Amino acid sequence: MMCTCIRQSFPLFLFAIMFAWQTHFCQSQAGEPWSADPALVSKLSASRPEFIYEESRVPAYTLPDPLSLKGKGRIDNAKDWDSLRQETLEKFRSEVYGRRPDLKYQVRFELIEEKSGLFGIDARGKSLRVVITSGNESYSFPMWVFLPAATHKHPAVLHINNREFPSFEKASTEPDEFWPVKDIVGRGFVACAVSTVAIDPDRADGFSDGIRGFFHRTSGAQEPPGDDAWKALSAWGWGASRALDYLLTCNEVDPTKIAVIGHSRAGKAALWAAAEDTRFAIACSNNSGCGGAALSRRAFGETVARITKSFPHWFCDRFSKYAGKEDSLPVDQHQLFALIAPRPVYATSASDDLWADPRGEYLSMVAASPVYRLFGESALTYAEMPALNEPRIAGKMGYHIRPGAHGLTLYDWTKFLDFCVKQF
Ligand code: GTR
């Protein structure tokens, strides 16, 4: 009798357990949508009243439709995207990041040093110089490449590094959260890095010392660069493309699986690099904010006025004319994500990094979703912010916001690599 009772109620019992587990699981996956800490908002608003830190002060705005350009009809199928993409790219070149000149050069890669048996996982490392020659002159910058032990083809992640570039020795031996080589290689990726400042100095007066000045000189140009000429962000992206040229020659690298990542100013450069160079299979922007992932029209935290004043060497000169007039920008940053479509793209924010406008970074991805959907991909369409530490992935788009300050952490890397594994 007892036995029959247990047997009969067993499915019910199992159902109850599953229900409880699922409810718990769902709850732990569905925390409160992130919103900025009110105490932090008050503090920042009080100390820097000239900047917007409160949602209620965000101006009303209408974003340009990524599927149509001014005066043109709306496209509704993927085969029309190429020409619209080209027009959008041109707008970004002429008004935001600047146009790269028609460059005549040769590139070669000099192997300086090799190491093996690294990180306790038998990884290998190569120190290289990327040498650009134009006319009789050369310009070079370093590149570090670390490879897993196995010799089959691996996906690769190229880091545009905007912090102090570690020496090759240091990168081969000392753990570094900003570029965690061992973790990247340990997960089966080739890890590659270039340094922003070695490609083009991160200084308002750095023109003649970097790759832009080099090309200006060697081209014999008589006139100074125009107001739509490329600046440092675009130069860093160009340098990343030369590292990509090298990775494409490596037997150990799967040429279809090369991702680019950058933090903050290098996050802006990584997105632009992937827009200009479709050989990058995935792009990741970490805390890139104004002029990167975040919508300019929200004018939240850092603004066009502020960024073009503080960093006149990042964007083309024309960008500064939109200071305080973001509504007249012919594009906004969601269209930068659209330029990467339908390739996978990932962005991150940090909860205390209100200067970079986390909500504006996420909404920018959402506003790019119509282009992903044009390709039949599911996309980030839900306007509510995800909860902290709960990455939201939809098709080829992914985003997370983590607690803490502006920075590139091991958490950010782990989630980005998870995304790459999933996409590859
Ligand atoms: C800040 C700048 C941001 C961001 C950051 C960084 O000073 O205002 O746009 O890019 O630097 O690169 O760390």
Image: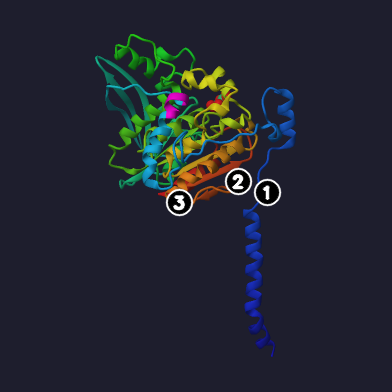
Badge 1 density bin: few <14, some 14–19, many ≥20, Cα 10 Å? few
Spatial CA span between label 2 and label 3: 17 Å
Badge 3 density bin: few <14, some 14–19, many ≥20, Cα 10 Å? some
What residue is pinned by disc 1? 32
Q: Residue at x 53, y 30 (%)?
A: 264
From this viewpoint, is residue 193 visible? no
The residue furthest top is: 222
Judged by its main secondary structure, the magenta piece is helix
Q: Nearer the viewer, residue 294 or 17?
A: 294
Reading the chain from its start, which is encountered first: label 3 or label 1? 1
Magenta stretch?
A: 91-96
Could you say which disc has been placed on residue 193 in the image? Answer: none
Spatial CA span between label 3 and label 1: 27 Å
Q: Nearer the viewer, residue 64 or 213?
A: 64
From this viewpoint, is residue 277 visible? yes
Q: Is residue 330 a member of the stretch shown in magenta?
A: no
Q: Quadrant of ligand 1?
A: top right
Q: Nearer the viewer, residue 231 or 214?
A: 231
Reading the chain from its start, which is encountered first: label 2 or label 3? 3
Amino acid under label 3? Glu
Badge 2 density bin: few <14, some 14–19, many ≥20, Cα 10 Å? few
